[in-house]
Image (cartoon, helix red, strand yellow):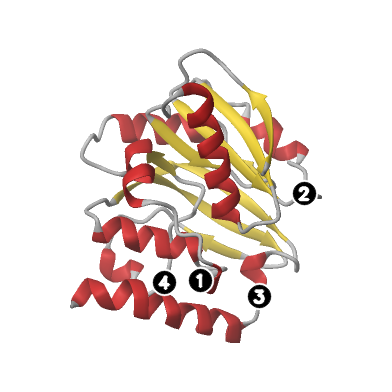
Amino acid sequence: MNDIKILKECQNPEVLVVTPLLPDHKISKITKKTFNRNETPIYWLSSAGNNNIPTNALEGIKWYKNEFGRLPPYYIMIDRDIELGRGMLDRLYEKLRKNPAIGYCYATFQFKGYMNIDFPAMPFDINRLVQCNYISSNSLFRSNVIEQVGLVTDNKYKRLLDYAFLLKCFKMGYVGIPEHNAWFIVHSTKDDISAGSQEDYKEKYMRVYEDFIKPLYS
């Protein structure tokens, strides 16, 4: 069972925020500081366990639902070591709230440090998405999308689990929308899962391709 810790709570939150952790990991000071520069009512918890990221996140979701009976209208997974632009969550929330036919909203982000890569918040395009994932897992989802689609947790896709989930969302009729004024920075180190070998990436991509991309065209 995962170790659940409550970081921030309120009555009638609009957004459930889950930060998945390994048992020896902590949420960085910069994440706590910059995330608190938002005004959207949230319930924020961390979920620590010896699992992959979406499995730990799912344990946090299950805990909240067991405690309160149902999820808030929106959900976001926030990594433990990112620097959020001021009002990032507020901007994602307002954009998604004003677009009821859209499943999720995503921000611009960039890796700094061991890797240096920019990912502008481009319009949703499934043809672009099947080529590479340009949408971060730190995106705001409607909770019904999370519940209906289901997070992808199988370790055979590890490193691309969030990518597999976005493709699964599309197959089930849910697309995203960018919010260009929302952004965050990932402070990358050599230990990050995103910094693995190219061979490992190709192996995982082919698994995602076979199981999630090919079915889109069949």
Is label 3 or label 1 in front?
1
Cβ atoms at labels 3 and 1 below 8 Å apart: no
Q: Secondary structure at mark 4?
A: loop
Query: Which callout, 3 or 4, points at the residue further toward the start of the chain?
Result: 4
The image quadrant of residue 9 is top right
Q: Which mark is residue 143?
A: none
Q: Which mark is residue 132?
A: 4
**Amino acid bearing label 4:** Cys
The image quadrant of residue 111 is bottom right
Q: Position of residue 30 (x, y in %)?
A: 73, 39
Separation of disc 1 and disc 2 at Cα? 22 Å
25 displayed left or right of 62: right
Query: Which callout, 3 or 1, points at the residue further toward the start of the chain?
Result: 1
Q: Which mark is residue 196?
A: 3
Separation of disc 3 and disc 1 at Cα? 13 Å
Q: Position of residue 46 (x, y in %)?
A: 66, 37
**Amino acid bearing label 3:** Gly
Tell me if I can see residue 104 in this picture: no
Tell me if I can see residue 211 in this picture: yes
| Image quarter hosting the N terminus | top right
Query: Which callout, 2 or 4, points at the residue further toward the start of the chain?
Result: 2
Is label 3 or label 4 in front?
3
The residue depicted at 33 percent of the width and 35 percent of the height is: 96
Is label 1 or label 4 in front?
1
Q: Residue under circle 2?
A: 23
Separation of disc 1 and disc 4 at Cα? 15 Å
Q: Which mark is residue 157?
A: 1
Cβ atoms at labels 1 and 4 below 8 Å apart: no
**Amino acid bearing label 1:** Tyr
